[in-house]
Image (cartoon, coloured by chain):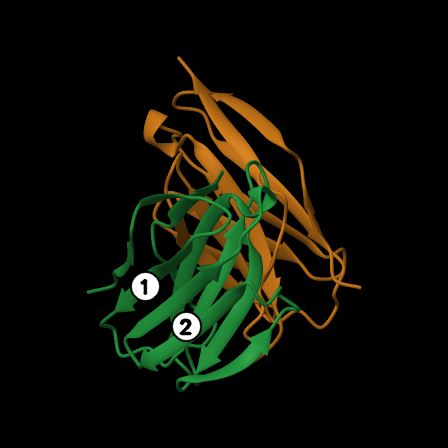
Chain colours: A orange, B green
């Protein structure tokens, strides 16, 4: 079956790097995503990676994909207070419209 | 313009009321989605419209009735809801074809059923 798992909480110090991890079970996943949700708001697509890629970097964000272990991570460099949010890992197949979300990781920043 | 708008932002309704949620996008996207999100949970897909036709219904109760009047608008008609239907209702859209995987979400309508 389809399942996406992530740890529920992460606390980091301002200025440090945050690493949020995710595992998925569907080997036919083609697209893997990271969404950010701030309190009371909708979801913002942060970045995505195709399953034939190992890494994608976009400014402070680095996504690493280990397809063999079905492990996805999001690294946020120089974490700021504005990065406080819930981060959802998600996956979908090639042209399917259904996205399967993980339970979300709540990132909190301490001074 | 990468914006999906939703109205109203908040809605309180009784179990005998009829109300509608509205969603609009002007990005030329041909796929539109309704999701339901309970507190501290991930979004759950309810419906997908593709080229204004319903393509996915995730076994949603009939008290939720979607409608896609044109390619820019998506409605969710609500009737005889239950208190457990209280949640954040999110609309999303994506461009069919090559970029189908990029879904853009609206801010949501927070629904409370009393």
Residue drawn 50% across and 44% down?
B87
Name the side, left or right, on which A65 lies relative to B80. Answer: right
Q: Do we see residue A54 in this rendering?
A: no
Question: What residue is drawn where x is 29% and y is 50%?
Answer: B8
x, y (%) of residue A74?
53, 45
Q: Nearer the viewer, residue B99 or A15?
A: B99
Q: Which residue lies at the image location 76% right of the left edge and 59% below the top edge?
A: A25
Foreground of the two, B29 or B67: B67
How far apart, in angstroms, are the residues tagged by discs 2 and 1? Answer: 9 Å
- Looking at the rendered image, the quarter that the N terminus of chain A falls into is bottom right
Q: Secondary structure at mark 1?
A: strand
Could you tell me which secondary element the residue under label 2 belongs to? strand
Residue that protrudes farthest toward the front in the picture = B16
The chain that hosts pointer 1 is B
In the image, what residue occupies the spot 32% across and 80% down?
Answer: B69
Query: Taking A51 as reference, is B66 left or right?
Result: left
Label 1 Cα neighbours within 10 Å, binned few <14 / some 14-19 / many ≥20: many
Q: Which residue is mark 1?
A: B23
Tell me residue A41's x, y (percent).
37, 42
State the residue lying farthest toward the right.
A1
Seen in the picture, residue B38 relative to B92 is either above or below; the reply is above
| Residue B35 appears in the rendering | yes
B84 is higher (above) or lower (below) than B46: above
Residue B32: image tag? 2
| In the depicted structure, whether residue B30 falls above or below residue A2 | below
Q: Are marks 2 and 1 in contact (CB under 8 Å)?
A: yes
């Amino acid at each position: 079956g389809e399942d996406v798992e992530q740890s529920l909480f992460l606390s980091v110090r301002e200025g440090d790097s945050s690493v949020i991890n995710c595992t998925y079970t569907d080997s036919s996943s083609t697209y893997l995503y990271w969404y950010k949700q701030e309190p009371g708001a909708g979801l913002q697509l942060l970045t995505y990676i195709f399953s034939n890629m190992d890494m994608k970097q976009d400014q402070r964000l680095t996504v690493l994909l280990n397809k063999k272990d079905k492990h996805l991570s999001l690294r946020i460099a120089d974490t700021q207070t504005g990065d406080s949010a819930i981060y959802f890992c998600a996956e979908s197949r090639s042209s399917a419209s259904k996205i399967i979300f993980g339970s979300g990781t709540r990132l909190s920043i301490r001074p | 313009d990468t914006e999906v708008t939703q109205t109203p932002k908040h809605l309180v309704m009784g179990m005998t009321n009829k109300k509608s949620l509205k969603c609009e996008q002007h990005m030329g996207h041909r796929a539109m989605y309704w999701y339901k999100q309970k507190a501290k949970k991930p979004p759950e897909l309810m419906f997908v419209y593709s080229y204004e036709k319903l393509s996915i219904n995730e076994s949603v109760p009939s008290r939720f009735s979607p409608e896609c009047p044109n390619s820019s608008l998506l409605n969710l008609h609500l009737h005889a809801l239950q208190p457990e239907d209280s949640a954040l209702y999110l609309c999303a859209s994506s461009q069919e074809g090559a970029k189908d995987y990029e879904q853009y979400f609206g801010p949501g309508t927070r629904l409370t059923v009393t």
